[in-house]
Image (cartoon, grey):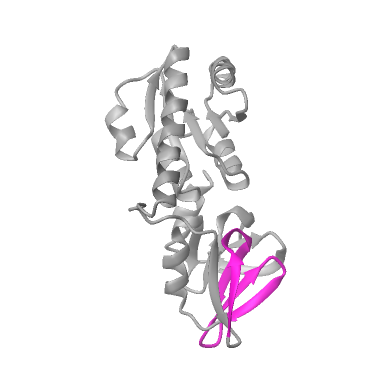
Amino acid sequence: MKIAIVDDERPSRSELRHLICEAFADAEVMEASCGEEAMEMFLKEDFDLIFMDINLGDMDGTTLAAMAKKAQPNVEIVFATAYNSYAEKAFDIDALNYILKPFDSKRIEQTLQRYMKKQSKHSYMRETGKEEEKTTISKISINSDKKMILVDISDIVYIETGNRACIVHVKGKSYTAACAMNSFEERLKENGFFRIHKSYLINLKYVVEIYPWFNNTTCVKMQGYEKEILTVGRNQIKELKQLFSM
């Protein structure tokens, strides 16, 4: 189980790490001390569970949680805070649990058990064909050159519109797909993709730079495609920057 702790207080992070590892020895735990650091971590690493404080100094924890959910739709959020006044707002974003400081070892253990029980239930429902919710798929089909090609969603860097088609850039390879951009956006929006422009749909985890360009425009630089200029639409700039805590 991979777990993230987001808290601006080092003692709280250390205590929570200790209690988590005490309850679940095989847990892999990573830490972030602010919202900006956390978002960078979420875009590089996939997590099963995030323990998050509400007051982070640079950002409200509930806002960060919503961003984390957008970047990693399957992650579970646990709010770990000294304030009980945010509980209603926390559960509005479907938080797994809401625990108060000072931390109680039993409460932490119960939270981890709740997570594992929920995952076991989902696994059982999938295996028995009783899964009611739409499951996240790891591959996507692309109709290219009269063939159906299956590619890993996580390998798609970005998609751009071409001549009556879309060009899908997959880690050094490109496929021309006879499919509308809106269709790709709908299929990939729950997998950490963001439509920065009518011509571009990008995988957020491959963004390496957001920079100003000519005539007050903004562009993004993608990993492995640093020489390509991907323009951000004026209406998308604010939301894109929020995703990266800018």
Spot occupied by residue 40 in the image (x, y as percentages of width and height): 60, 43
Spot occupied by residue 184 in the image (x, y as percentages of width and height): 47, 70
Is residue 170 in sight in this rendering?
yes
Residue toward you, 174 or 118: 118
Is residue 54 in sight in this rendering?
no
Left or right: 236, with 163 as reference point: left
Magenta region, residue range = 147-176
Spot occupied by residue 11 in the image (x, y as percentages of width and height): 57, 14
| Residue drawn at 63 percent across, 61 percent down | 155
Is residue 167 a member of the stretch shown in magenta?
A: yes
Q: Main secondary structure of the magenta part?
A: strand
Q: Is residue 93 above or below residue 223?
A: above
Name the quarter where the N terminus is drawn.
Answer: top right
Q: Residue furthest front?
A: 128
Left or right: 235, with 230 as reference point: left
Spot occupied by residue 112 in the image (x, y as percentages of width and height): 47, 27
